[in-house]
Amino acid sequence: GVQQRITELESECDLIVVLCTGTFDGLSAAVPVVFPDEVLHERVRTLGIARRLHVIAPTAEQKPFLTAKWATAVDKLSFTSSSPYQEFYLADVVADISASRPEGVVLDCMGYRGEHKARILDSFLQ
């Protein structure tokens, strides 16, 4: 479906941004396509937090995929799942982050909002 939509849009656009942090291999377009996944990887590298990264994703079932996705970008990965679309389990997220002692945290889904980030940060600043 993503390739079909890109093909439909590419003649009307100068740039296409895929609003999902998943990986999309094999897509092609006549215009540049930006994938947030690639932007996240590069940002982790430039921030210098690639040794120990903690990833938060919507479901535990995503862990194998995300482990493989981040394996090329980070040395050690820890993981928590809590959906941005349902109840956000802040206590579990904070406990997992504390236990893993990462250099950085990535909210790996476009569904997370500033509210999620603020709640996590506030927990550590109190």
Image (cartoon, grey):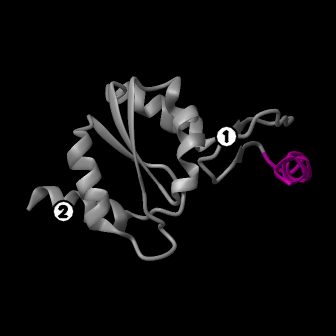
> How would you classify the magenta stretch by its main secondary structure?
helix
Q: Quadrant of the N terminus?
A: bottom right
- As for residue 4 lying within the magenta part, the answer is yes
Q: Residue at x 30, y 39 (%)?
A: 104
For label 2, count other residues whose C-alpha is less than 10 Å away and answer few (under 14), some (14-19) or many (20+).
Answer: few
Q: Residue at x 57, y 54 (%)?
A: 61
Is 112 on the left or on the right of 19, as rendered?
A: left
Q: Quadrant of the C terminus?
A: bottom left
Nearest to the observer: residue 111 or residue 17: 111
Residue 108 coordinates in the image, percent (x, y)? 49, 49
Image height of 99 relative to 31, above or below: below
Say which label, 2 or 1, has the lower sequence index: 1
Which mark, by number, is residue 122? 2
Image height of 87 relative to 42, above or below: below
Cα distance, mark 2 to mark 1?
Answer: 31 Å
Q: In this picture, which residue range is highlighted in magenta?
A: 1-13
Image height of 61 relative to 43, above or below: below
Q: Residue at x 39, y 71 (%)?
A: 88
Residue 45 coordinates in the image, percent (x, y)? 41, 25
Q: Are marks 2 and 1 in contact (CB under 8 Å)?
A: no
Q: Which residue is mark 1?
A: 23
Nearest to the observer: residue 105 or residue 12: 105
